[in-house]
Image (spheres, rainbow, N blue to C red):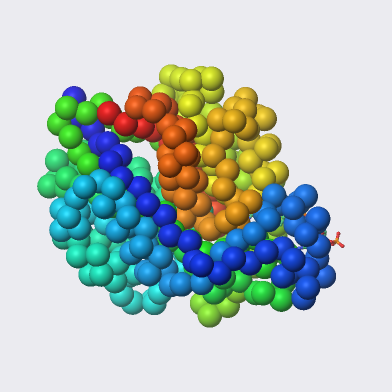
Amino acid sequence: MSGSVITGWGTALPEKVVTNAEFEARLETTDTWIVERTGIHERRFGGTTSGLAVEAGAAAITMAGLAPSEIDLLILATTTPDKAIPATSSTVHAQLGCSGAAFDLNTACAGYVYATVVADAMLGAGIGFKRALVIGSETLSVITDMEDRATAVLFADGAGAVVFEHRDDAQPLILASDLGLDGSLLSILYCDHGGFMKMEGREVFRRAVRATVESALKVLDQAGVTADEIALFVPHQANQRIIDAMTQRLGIPQDRTAIVLDKTGNTSSASIPIALAAAADAGRLSDGDLILFSGFGAGMTWASAVVRWGQ
Ligand code: ACO
């Protein structure tokens, strides 16, 4: 038996806190509307995608007790790269001092779960990789129209990172996974080069609930576990009402669900690792616990996985 284990994690949030009151002061919106319709109270704006990724990645590597040069696979999930060329993972790789391979992966808010599944597969493939750093990092404030009340209040900046190490004596990290997308829904959420995100919010909401619930049920079934056996559900942090609809349909109570969006807003591919790290830091996870990840995003992509925490 061999598998990967999670040995470190870290997050980075910009210092600048933007409260709902700041939007209330300059857009036709209210704190009450934002809280009731999204669950978001505040979010963070600032930094660069590579800078936030380096901060989160360095914290994760330190927690794992590794030198950066011992990381031989770096996958950066992002929809907001610093530049078109080179990949932002190249900057992060250089600044952290990692070795081996690095690449960017863009499946929007499903990015972290996609990247985790890819990293685990590469570590287990016997092709020479031993330690992976998976980072979700975003600066969505750069591609958000701050004059558009329908999107300005939702999206934000941040990064989360996790170190995975392959061990010959470990159980498999991922019990089941489901990665997919429906390309016929490209137009409900997109951003042209140099432009701002355009979103049909109500349609994204409807599709997101359906896709993530179906995907989560599929991985639970494939893993041969029930919702009762999931110690922690870590959904993409887009909207509290989407999370509520998912938890109700999956039968997972809120006290077994990781929520950070009230303080972070929607940080796309960074949202799941930030929520995971917050739960782990709060002591909500024990060795052997099963975690259910479920994300969805532009594409429209979705990704779910049942993951074993600890040894
Ligand atoms: N303040 C006040 N009113 C607002 C605001 C605001 N900030 N934003 C929209 N409204 C108005 C709309 O203009 C509309 O007015 P109208 O009825 O006069 O036309 C009204 O509120 C209702 O609009 P809806 O879009 O129906 O509101 P809804 O309850 O669906 O909430 C929201 C909107 C929060 C965007 C919700 O649809 C949602 O969360 N959708 C999913 C978004 C999401 O998850 N996106 C991320 C995908 S992940 C990725 O890949 C980045």
Q: Is residue 120 visible to us here?
A: no
Tell which of 185 and 156 is nearer to you.
Answer: 156
Q: Residue at x 42, y 55 (%)?
A: 11
The image shows a total of numbered marks equal to 0
The vertical placement of 281 against 291, above or below, is below
Q: Residue at x 47, y 39 (%)?
A: 282
Provide residue 91's location: percent of width, then percent of height. Answer: 29, 71
Provide residue 296's location: percent of width, then percent of height. Answer: 54, 48
The quarter of the picture where residue 140 lies is bottom right
Q: Residue at x 51, y 72 (%)?
A: 46
Say which quadrant the N terminus sits in: top left
Tell which of 187 and 202 is nearer to you.
Answer: 202
Answer with left or right where residue 174 lies relative to residue 126.
Answer: right
Q: Is residue 261 visible to us here?
A: yes
Answer with left or right where residue 211 lies relative to residue 283.
Answer: right
Answer with left or right where residue 261 lies relative to residue 32.
Answer: left
The quarter of the picture where residue 148 lies is bottom right
Provide residue 169's location: percent of width, then percent of height. Answer: 17, 27
List the single residue furthest toward the bottom.
194
Answer with left or right where residue 46 lies relative to residue 19.
Answer: left
Tell which of 178 and 103 is nearer to you.
Answer: 103
Provide residue 35's location: percent of width, then percent of height. Answer: 74, 53
Q: Residue at x 27, y 56 (%)?
A: 74
Say which quadrant the C terminus sits in: top left
The vertical placement of 171 against 212, above or below, is above
| Ligand 1 positioned in quadrant | bottom right
